[in-house]
Every structure is written in C-alpha cells, then in structure tokens.
Image: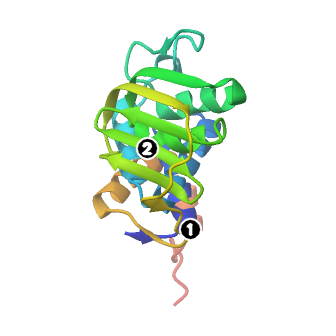
Amino acid sequence: MIVSLNEAEVMAMKAAWGAGRPWGLAQEAGRAMSTLEALRLPGAASLLDLLIASDGVPCEKLRPQSTQAEWWQADRPMCPALVGAFISDLGAQSQAVKLRQVQAPLLLVPFCLMAFDNVVFNWSGCTIRSCDEGFLVDGAPDAKVADQVSIDSSEPAKEATHRWQPGAVDIADDIWEALSAFAHRTYVPASEASRLKGAGAGLTDND
C-alpha cells in the first residue's frame, strides 16, 4: 500500500487509539511510526506488533514502575511509547537509561531524539546510532520484544544507513489492513437515521 507520510501517521494514531491508548499517547505513537517509515525503518510493522501484544491492556501495566531505579521495568513488556514519553520528559536528565523487557523497541528511537543530542541504542542483535544525516543501523531492528535495552549519549556516527526520505512510503498490505482493523474500532456505528441521511436515495427514489 503506497501512502503519504501524513496518511500513515493518521492511520497509526487511530489504530493506537483503537487499541486502548489515550488520544495524546496515540498521537505520539503515530508520529513515531511515521518518523521511522520516513527513515525507511519498519515503523508500521513495529507498531502493529505492539498493538497486538498489548491490545486493551491498561497503561498502568505497560509503563515503568520506577524511573529512579537502575533498570526500568514493569510486570510485562513495556510500551515503547510510554517509556519514550518518560524519557523525553526527563530531557537532559536522561544521561543513560536501562530497560528490561520492551515491546517493539524500535519505536523508542524517535522519542529519544528529544532527550539526547546524539544517542545510541543497543538491544540483542541491534545497535542504532544517530548522526547528522539520520541513523547508522547495525543488525536487525525489528525485534518484537527486547529483553534488555540500553540508551545512552554517544558521539555521532560518521555515516548513515537510513536517511530521512520525504514522500510516499510503501507499507505491506497485510500490515495496513491490520492497522485499519484497529482504527475501525474508533468509528461510530451507523444508526438507522444516519444511514437514511447518508449517500444514496435511502427510502426515497426520485429517479
């Protein structure tokens, strides 16, 4: 499915909202997904993994129990949008963060850009380092769950493997359809009155 970045962001917001995220957090998730897609990183697939795994789970169970502990963790894999919101709120205080059990860790990347001038992410099989032109990605970034994630200030990478590319993005049809199914939950069911006022002749045919 070829869509604009704006269409991708709107779909992501509605899908996150349909999966039970508050509207403000759903907006943040949408922006994170579209940022990753603009970098040609699998943002849509990561968001879908997150929504499937945490569908309907209250936010209290998906956020870190404490941001003062050496390792941030919860009773189940944490939501990267919630964790990312905490990190961006801490700003300059976020010298380094260690996380246990994060769902779809790739979604953390856009959030941390607001807290770190230059940042490096590490989880099993993947290292992502920021640079002036984008990100240097070493390994597979599309883990469904990362057992441990470290985020730290870093010297910028000297080259980028993924650069910002404005314009349309290609999201796999099955991923787009699955996100659409989550988004559909936000639509108001049609009533008999709304159907009669909608497109078409309704009960009156003037032809």
Q: Where is residue 12 in the image (x, y as percent from the top left)?
A: 50, 51
Q: Position of residue 114 (x, y in %)?
A: 66, 40
Closer to the eye: label 2 or 1: 2
Crowdedness of circle 2 by 10 Å Cα count: few (<14), some, many (20+)? many
Dot 2 or dot 1, earlier in sequence: 2
- Give the SS element for disc 1: loop
Q: How far apart are marks 2 and 1 (CA)?
A: 50 Å
Left or right relative to 59: residue 51 = left
Q: Can residue 162 be seen in this view?
A: yes
- Mark 2–mark 1 CB contact (< 8 Å): no
Q: Which one is in front, 79 or 119?
A: 119
Does residue 55 lie above or below 201 as drawn?
above
Disc 1 marks a residue whose amino acid type is Gly
Q: Which one is in front, 167 or 21?
A: 167
Per the rendering, the mark at residue 128 is: 2
Is the image coloured rainbow, by chain, by secondary structure, or in one colour?
A: rainbow
Crowdedness of circle 1 by 10 Å Cα count: few (<14), some, many (20+)? few
Q: Where is residue 142 in the image (x, y as percent from the top left)?
A: 33, 45
At x 40%, y 34%, the residue is 122
Q: Which residue lies furthest to the bottom in this view?
A: 207
Q: Where is residue 118 in the image (x, y as percent from the top left)?
A: 60, 42
Quarter of the rendering occupied by the N terminus = bottom left
- Give the SS element for disc 2: strand
At x 63%, y 25%, the residue is 94
Disc 2 marks a residue whose amino acid type is Ile
**How many numbered marks have been drawn onto this rendered protein structure?**
2
Per the rendering, the mark at residue 52 is: none
- Residue at the disc numbered 1: 198
Q: Can residue 58 be seen in this view?
A: no
At x 56%, y 11%, the residue is 66
